[in-house]
Image (cartoon, rainbow, N blue to C red):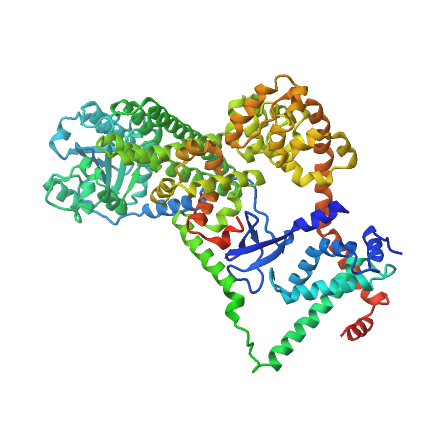
């Protein structure tokens, strides 16, 4: 006799109507689970756009909700099982597809699909080069990004303002460090916030002045 | 339910892969950089979805040491202790000889026990020293005596700005390590030798003869071959030349002047420069700090050396190893402190008052950074008790890490700016009064993350004004539309209003007004703080964590075997669908 969790109960309630809001919410809620399962099974990260494997996982998850029988097991275990099976099928089919259609090369222009990714890659490489001038690695930025959402926001504002002032940018490139005192004076802020996050600020300044639009959406 | 969903959604993130390293990759997601595990087919610039499970948690706290750089110094230092081959024929009736070149050059002839048996004045200057007393002295005493006489006779002045060098050259065919270790020992212990740089090298008897002929310091002869011969080499001119110095280091070692003496020397000569009071103050701060650090390290080294000796006595190999490691580390630290760029540059500045303005500006820029670092470092070293003693000014200098050390009492002293640096954990320590000091930005944090989680009771406690306070967008409205309400609350509002605007530059809309909001604040935020933070955290994590998954993993298999949903059932279903 297994203990029925609240979640399992919910599944039995929503499985009747797959078009309900509750169903949709439930699926959204479990996206990370789907993501983890897909990613684990495939051994790679899921792409944000158009990842077939993720759609397979999502479909399997919905199927699991509909077919779930509360007497049998916990829902999550069941859902994972269903998803794994579907993914296995998917992988198998994909392999077959590759072998069987060896002449049948895709007619679609692949450059269309990769355009964005390629452009992004170029931007990242440029940013990497620029950062290295200042002795900064992306890896350093992990520990040196402001932890606090707030500080991050303020730091970003300061960086953007800095990138708009030519003399400050010139100083940055010439001396390879931020004109901290001048920035404090001009933006009415404390040394602490600039000094403590100097590498983070430099990275944003570079993104702004080099007009790395794609990266900018992430900062 | 709501909380769960929130937590779940929060744990899935979208990011772009910035760079792949050997052990991990770095992604940029929502303004932050994360380290994530490596998986197949990762590409730079790839836009991926990932969860908290994929993240690699970095160790907290700041790096105490730039270890890489120090290791290199250590390797470099150990390479320099290379013994140059130099053996002399010993038919002169003494076991070995040591030549001391300051500018007076003296050759000390030693017996087997490193006692001075005789001496030879190698140049005119040496004749002016009273050398007769040297006979019978131990090598250590003799070295100190020669150095002291050179100072007394005005050949060198350890207190002026110029770096003073004494070259000690061992001329011997037997184990020269003995002499080297004596030199090192006496350098550490002698008051006079502490204040100068000692360059130690080794030479052959032939080279001593050659030096006599050329009237040049013997220690420089072997090095000097590769240097321009046109000028007569002197100790002073030789070591002023950086190239020559590095050439020397190929064959010998330099035992540097003690840093604290060097700093004293610099400090005593600061007034010769045309600097503003503030600049002098800055310089003194840095110098005093370096000195303090140095003396701390030296003390530590002393302790470590004692421990090493004790370990040797006890014979515990682990202990010996440990002590040796500590000593090595401390020596490296002292070395790197002595090599400090700022001090070198300051010395240049003091010696060469013609230095251009840009260089000076540059120096002070980096000094300022250093001071900043010193202040931050100091804060990091403080423990909770120290925090209690702090006054408000200090708080301004604290960074986020330091905040974690604060206890509740300290919070009372904090001002608004400081609040910005607090993270959620710190919030838990705050008491109700402190909440009054929180500014809008801080409130937002609580809003966005936690408002949804507030239970209905909390909501009921809040009145409309309060809601306005918490919402950033409503901030302006509050300043304008809600003015009337506020006036009711407190007559002094206008005063505070001024404050608000003055703070606007920093984007802190201050909520200092205890009177205004004390009621609302007390109720609402304290509730929020105590209950909801913890609620949310708990649920989030327990949910995200492996609990769920692991449960199911276990059941997964039993499910396969024992229950009705067997594989066949499934494949049937599949075929139906397709």
Q: Position of residue A102 (x, y in %)?
A: 57, 81
Residue B344 location, quadrant: top left
In the depicted view, which residue is nearer to us: A76 or A25? A25
Q: Position of residue B115 (x, y in %)?
A: 26, 33
In the depicted view, which residue is nearer to us: B507 or A56? B507
Q: Is residue B182 left or right of residue B426?
A: left
Which quarter of the rendering shows the C terminus of chain B? bottom right
Q: Is residue B231 visible?
A: yes
In the depicted view, which residue is nearer to us: A172 or B272? A172
B460, above or below A28, in the image: above
Q: Position of residue B528 (x, y in %)?
A: 71, 33
Residue beneath the point at 61% across and 23% down: B412
Q: Residue furthest top?
A: B491
What number of labels is visible?
0
Residue B153 location, quadrant: top left
In the depicted view, which residue is nearer to us: B371 or B477? B477
B479, above or below A161, in the image: above
């Amino acid at each position: 006799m297994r203990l029925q969790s609240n979640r399992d109960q919910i599944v039995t309630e929503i499985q009747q109507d797959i078009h309900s809001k509750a169903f949709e919410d439930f699926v959204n809620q479990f996206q990370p689970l789907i993501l983890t399962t897909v990613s684990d099974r495939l051994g790679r990260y899921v792409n944000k756009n158009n990842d077939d494997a993720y759609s397979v996982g999502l479909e399997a998850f919905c199927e699991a909700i509909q077919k779930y029988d509360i007497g049998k097991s916990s829902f999550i275990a069941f859902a994972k099982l269903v998803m794994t099976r579907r993914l296995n099928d998917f992988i198998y089919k994909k392999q077959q597809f590759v072998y069987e259609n060896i002449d049948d090369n895709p007619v679609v222009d692949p450059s269309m699909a990769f355009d964005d990714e390629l452009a992004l890659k170029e931007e990242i490489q440029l940013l990497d080069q620029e950062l290295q001038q200042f002795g900064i690695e992306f890896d350093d930025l992990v520990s040196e990004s402001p932890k606090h959402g707030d500080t991050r926001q303020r730091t970003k504002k300061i960086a953007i303002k800095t990138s708009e002032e030519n003399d400050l940018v010139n100083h940055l490139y010439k001396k390879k460090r931020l004109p901290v005192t001048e920035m404090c004076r001009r933006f009415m802020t404390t040394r602490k916030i600039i000094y403590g996050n100097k590498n983070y600020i430099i990275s944003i300044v570079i993104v702004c002045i080099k007009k790395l639009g794609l990266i900018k959406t992430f900062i | 339910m709501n909380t769960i969903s929130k937590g779940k959604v929060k744990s899935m993130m979208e990011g772009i892969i910035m760079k792949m390293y050997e052990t991990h990759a770095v992604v940029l997601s929502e303004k932050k950089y994360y380290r994530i595990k490596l998986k197949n087919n990762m590409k730079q610039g790839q836009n991926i979805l990932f969860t908290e499970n994929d993240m690699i948690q970095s160790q907290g706290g700041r790096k105490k040491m730039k270890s890489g750089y120090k290791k290199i110094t250590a390797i470099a230092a150990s390479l320099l202790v290379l013994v140059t081959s130099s053996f002399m024929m010993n038919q002169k009736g003494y076991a070995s000889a040591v030549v001391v070149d300051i500018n007076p050059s003296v050759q000390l002839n030693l017996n087997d026990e490193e006692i001075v048996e005789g001496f030879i004045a190698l140049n005119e200057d040496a004749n002016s020293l009273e050398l007769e007393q040297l006979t019978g002295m131990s090598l250590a005493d003799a070295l100190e005596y020669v150095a002291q006489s050179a100072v007394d006779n005005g050949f060198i002045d350890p207190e002026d700005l110029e770096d003073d060098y004494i070259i000690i050259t061992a001329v011997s065919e037997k184990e020269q390590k003995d002499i080297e270790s004596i030199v090192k020992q006496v350098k550490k212990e002698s008051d006079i030798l502490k204040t100068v740089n000692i360059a130690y090298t080794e030479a052959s008897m032939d080279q001593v003869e050659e030096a006599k002929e050329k009237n040049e310091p013997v220690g420089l002869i072997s090095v000097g071959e590769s240097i321009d011969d046109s000028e007569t080499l002197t100790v002073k001119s030789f070591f002023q030349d950086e190239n020559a110095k590095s050439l020397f280091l190929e064959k010998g070692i330099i035992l540097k002047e003690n840093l604290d003496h060097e700093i004293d020397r610099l400090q005593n000569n600061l007034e010769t420069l045309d600097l503003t009071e503030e600049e002098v103050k800055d310089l003194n701060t840095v110098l005093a700090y370096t000195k303090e650090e140095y003396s701390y390290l030296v003390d530590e080294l002393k302790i470590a050396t004692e421990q090493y000796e004790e370990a040797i006595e006890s014979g515990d190999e682990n202990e010996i190893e440990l002590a040796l490691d500590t000593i090595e580390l401390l020596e490296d630290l002292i070395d790197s402190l002595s090599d400090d760029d700022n001090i070198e540059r300051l010395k240049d500045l003091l010696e060469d008052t013609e230095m251009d303005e840009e260089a000076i500006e540059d120096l002070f820029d980096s000094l300022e950074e250093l001071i900043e670092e010193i202040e931050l470092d100091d804060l990091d070293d403080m423990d909770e008790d120290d925090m209690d003693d702090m006054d408000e000014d200090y708080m301004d200098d604290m960074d986020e890490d330091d905040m974690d050390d604060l206890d509740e009492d300290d919070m009372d002293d904090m001002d608004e700016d400081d609040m910005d640096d607090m993270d959620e954990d710190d919030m838990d320590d705050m008491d109700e009064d402190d909440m009054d000091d929180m500014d809008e930005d801080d409130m937002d944090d609580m809003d966005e993350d936690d408002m949804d989680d507030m239970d209905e009771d909390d909501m009921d406690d809040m009145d409309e004004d309060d809601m306005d306070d918490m919402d950033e967008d409503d901030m302006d409205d509050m300043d304008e539309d809600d003015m009337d309400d506020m006036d009711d609350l407190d007559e002094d509002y206008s005063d505070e209003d001024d404050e608000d605007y003055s703070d606007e530059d920093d984007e802190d809309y201050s909520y200092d007004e205890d009177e205004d909001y004390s009621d609302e604040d007390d109720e609402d935020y304290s509730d929020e703080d105590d209950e909801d933070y913890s609620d949310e955290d708990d649920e989030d994590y327990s949910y995200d964590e492996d609990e769920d998954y692991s449960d199911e993993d276990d059941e997964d298999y039993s499910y396969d075997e024992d229950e009705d949903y067997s594989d066949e059932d499934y494949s049937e279903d599949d075929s139906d669908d397709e």
